[in-house]
Image (cartoon, rainbow, N blue to C red):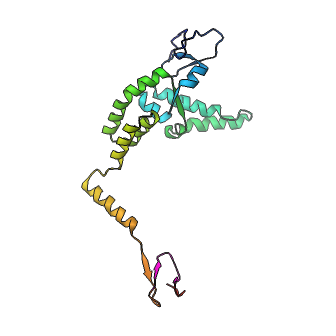
């Protein structure tokens, strides 16, 4: 994303001098004071970012890989090169596992407007977990709870019957009767709790 070359920080409305410590939003290219963006930025998971910014999918993956590469030790050249090769070979899901994207206030407002439609599309595609994750990241807990309720609801009469049967099995407790004293013992015991005989 090309920087917008704005000379005034949108967060504090103060002029940014030539030597000011600046930071550019990765998604919209707006320039902020570093401390203003750090204070007002919204952090979302990398997986949510790829869903909310599908046209920037490759750039988000690239930033996530670069962050892992930056954490590698640079003292040993051989280890560093092996680490880079390992990071580049990682699947996307593993790269994004603990990666966070930083949204500026403008991007965060835009994302909150578009998130309900994104969540609805994911819900129609039965990708409920991803939709709930998006809403959780943006603090839209009401929508997240609604989708999680749909996730936990059985989708067919057969599945409902299976879930009910599983619930009944979970409550079932198996007891073994001792053949010597007729006392009831837990299934996991090998000797009778009452008389000590082998079960």
Q: Residue furthest right?
A: 75
46 relative position to 174: left or right = right
Q: How many marks?
A: 0
The residue under the point 53% across, 20% down is 25
Q: Which is nearer the eye, 131 or 183?
A: 183
The residue under the point 50% across, 22% down is 104
Residue 159, given in percent of the width and then of the height, sits at: 29, 56
Question: Is 9 placed above or below 142 here?
Answer: above
The residue under the point 54% across, 12% down is 13
Residue 27 appears in the picture as rendered: no
Residue 133, given in percent of the width and then of the height, sits at: 43, 39
Q: Quadrant of residue 83?
A: top right
The residues colored magenta run 183-193
Residue 44, given in percent of the width and then of the height, sits at: 49, 32
69 relative position to 140: left or right = right
The residue under the point 57% across, 32% down is 65
Question: Is 53 placed above or below 89 here?
Answer: above
Instruction: Assess whether residue 190 is covered by the magenta stretch.
Output: yes
Magenta part, dominant SS: loop
Q: Residue furthest left?
A: 157
Residue 95, given in percent of the width and then of the height, sits at: 54, 37
Q: Which is nearer the eye, 129 or 78?
A: 129
Q: Quadrant of residue 84?
A: top right
């Amino acid at each position: 994303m090309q920087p917008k070359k704005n000379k005034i920080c949108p967060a504090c409305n103060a002029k940014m001098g030539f030597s000011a410590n600046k930071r550019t939003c990765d998604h919209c290219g707006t320039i902020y004071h570093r401390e203003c963006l750090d204070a007002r930025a919204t952090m979302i998971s990398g997986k949510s970012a790829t869903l909310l910014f599908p046209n920037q999918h490759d750039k988000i993956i690239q930033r996530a890989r670069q962050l892992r590469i930056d954490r590698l030790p640079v003292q040993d050249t051989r280890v560093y090169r092996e680490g880079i090769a390992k990071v580049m070979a990682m699947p996307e899901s593993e790269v994004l596992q603990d990666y966070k994207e930083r949204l500026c206030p403008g991007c965060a407002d835009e994302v909150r407007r578009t998130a309900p439609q994104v969540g609805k599309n994911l819900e129609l595609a039965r990708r409920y977990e991803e939709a709930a994750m998006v809403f959780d990241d943006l603090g839209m807990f009401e929508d997240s709870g609604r989708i999680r309720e749909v996730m936990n609801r059985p989708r067919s009469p057969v599945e409902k019957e299976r879930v009910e049967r599983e619930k009944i099995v979970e409550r079932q407790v198996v007891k073994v009767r001792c053949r010597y004293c007729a006392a009831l013992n837990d299934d996991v015991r090998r000797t009778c709790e009452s008389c000590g005989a082998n079960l």
